[in-house]
Image: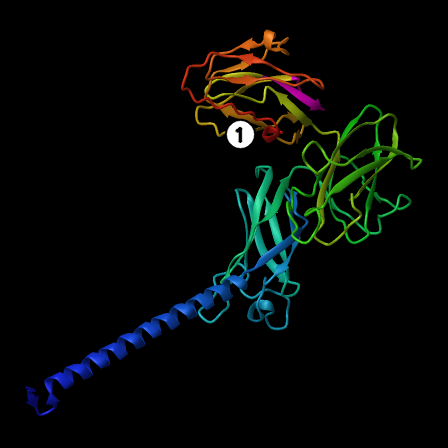
Amino acid sequence: MNVRTSGGSVGARLGAWFFLAAVCAAAAASSEKAKANARSRTEIAEKASRPVLSHLFPAGGQRGKTFTITVTGTNLLTETNLLRAGTNQVAGANQVAGANEEPALQARISGPGVMARVIQALGRNKVRVSVSIAPDAPLGEREFRLVSRRGVSNRARFVVGQFPEVRETEPNNDKTQPQRLARLPVLVNGQIEAGDRDMFRFAGKTGQTLVCQVQARALRPYVADAAPGWMDAILTLYDATGRQIGAQDDTRDSPDPVLIFKVPQDGDYTLEIADALYRGRADFVYRLSIGATPHMTHLYPLGGRRGAETPVKLRGVNLPAQNTNLALALDAPAVVPVVVKRGNWVSSPARFAAGSLPEIEETEPNNSQTRSNRVSAPVTINGRIQRAGETDWFAFAGQAGQRLVLEVRARRLG
């Protein structure tokens, strides 16, 4: 039996209501799905339009100085903030944007003592940035990024240096017309373009030990469309007659060369930098330092125990001493950078491991099982393989069921 009202049967009305509710729910679900899709498309579009950095030139500067760098990439600027009033000033650069103004394009460099500001648009994919480094800014590598409303760029590496800096000046790709460097030490910022090599001439004095060190892969560890995926720098040294007297490609496990040269007599010398495979492109950026500056090749031992002081042998050139004591705090990180200073100049850092176990040094002779050093686990053993074919042996007591971890750290510590 159907119960009727003035609007029709209750069953019919309930059916209509259920149908309407289902339609509304479906419409709401469709609307939410559409909104989600729109958000997803927006996020993808925004991510695709975020600024992407290719390279900086120069990729660093001397502390205590103010200078400009050129930043190259993609999506650095939009049409609305590319130019203002027909000038090449970036709209709202490093300022808080107004309600109707495109948000500022800002430059950021990590760490204390460094300020960066976008000052000029050189096109949609290139800008000029002013950088100021405080005299007491810590030396070393920083992160550089650009920030816009569309997001934060990938990082580029920026180095705070200590030496006076110059930029290479073309033409300088032949021994007959090298770029003259007036005084040492100096740091040269350069680029190896297609088919390029750069030559630099300087005066050397008898008995000096000069350190010629390149940062290239250290600045751009991976270039996606290059094989190998970095600038593979090589240094070649010539005397005043043009005769080759030295060369350096890789240094240990790094493709960035360090050429150490003891000057035989007063005179002019020419240093060439090129890519080992004769490639070249605008993003093959390098920093080349030359001078009789302190440089550590290695330490021994490679580490010490936290909360203790460790006697350490320093090895390298132009060092102020051959031995020192390194004290590690109880909260020292796993790897501590160690530098030495001679005069006004600081060496590049060496890596020193901080551990929590008792530490000992190997005792020679221990190059056979019958001559094994007896040790008690847990322990950290500091040792050296000093000649080809050498082996070091260690004996310890073990218990059934024990799980022992034996781990070597060598290359990781340089």
Where does residue 375 sit, x and y in percent of width and height? 51, 11
Placement of 256 over or under 391, stated as above or below: below
Specify whether 55 is left or right of 37. Answer: right
Name the image colouring. Answer: rainbow
Rendered view: 289 above or below 36: above
Q: Is residue 81 visible?
A: yes
What's the amino acid at mark 1? Val
Instruction: Say if the magenta span includes residue 157.
Output: no
Residue 277 place in picture, x, y as percent = 78, 46
For this view, does 402 lie left or right of residue 319? left
Q: Where on the picture, by quarter, is residue 163?
A: top right
Residue at the spot 69% in from the left edge and 43% down from the top edge: 216
Residue farthest along the front direction in this orientation: 1
Residue 103 visible in the shown view: no
**Residue 335 picture location, percent across and down:** 53, 29
Residue at 46% from the left image edge and 17% from the top image edge: 378
- Please identify the quadrant where the N terminus is shown: bottom left
**Residue 272 at x, y percent in the picture:** 82, 41
275 vs 405, left or right, is: right
**Figure disc tally:** 1
Q: In what element is the residue under mark 1?
A: strand
* Viewer-side residue, 234 vs 410: 410
- Residue at 70% across, 51% down: 226
Q: Tell me if residue 316 is in the magenta stretch.
A: yes
Q: Nearer the viewer, residue 280 or 253?
A: 253
Q: Which stretch did the figure color magenta?
A: 312-322
Q: Nearer the viewer, residue 35 or 148?
A: 35
